[in-house]
Amino acid sequence: MKDWRPKLAAIDDPIADDYWSYETRDGTRRTSRVTIGRPAPLADNRDWYCPILFEHVTEGIHYSYGVGPVDALMNAMYFVRRRFYAFKEVRPRAKPTTGSRRRKASQRGESARSKTQK
């Protein structure tokens, strides 16, 4: 039987990307990247999936499935929401830890943008 599940190496088309700081059940303070990808159809073109990468929670990319794109996205957000309530003191928009792959805007780029907006 052929494995029908998607096998993404990365989420190239994120619709939501953030860092959360939180406390785990054992009291460890942690910062994790949470990325939700755009829903896409499965190979059967009937059902849909939505990729989720939750650093320190999922092992690689996790997938939620649904009968349509909105259903797959709702299931992905339910997965993330359950983790939000399972952790203590969750702080969205946390600063990423050192070695993060998220690009920071350069000072030069921001000053150039502000001059063009004036």
Image (tube, helix red, strand yellow):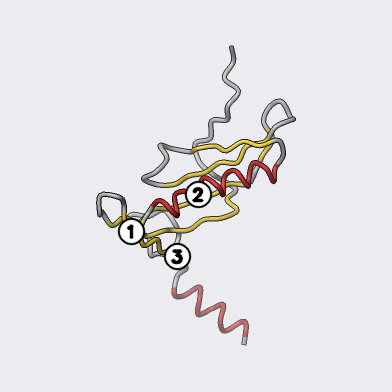
Name the secondary structure under disc 1.
loop
Q: How many numbered discs sit on the rendered protein?
A: 3
**Image quarter of residue 93:** bottom left
Which disc is residue 5 wearing? none
Which disc is residue 97 wearing? 1
In percent of the image, x 52 and y 45: which residue is there?
A: 79
* Front position in the image: 95 or 113: 95
* Left or right for 61, reference 56: right
Badge 2: residue crowd in 10 Å (few <14, some 14–19, many ≥20): some
Percent x, y of residue 80: 50, 49
In percent of the image, x 67 and y 36: which residue is there?
A: 48
Q: Residue furthest right?
A: 46
* Left or right for 48, reference 101: right
Q: Which residue is mark 3?
A: 93
**Residue type (three-letter) at the residue carrying disc 2:** Val
In percent of the image, x 48 and y 58: which residue is there?
A: 18
Q: Residue furthest left?
A: 27
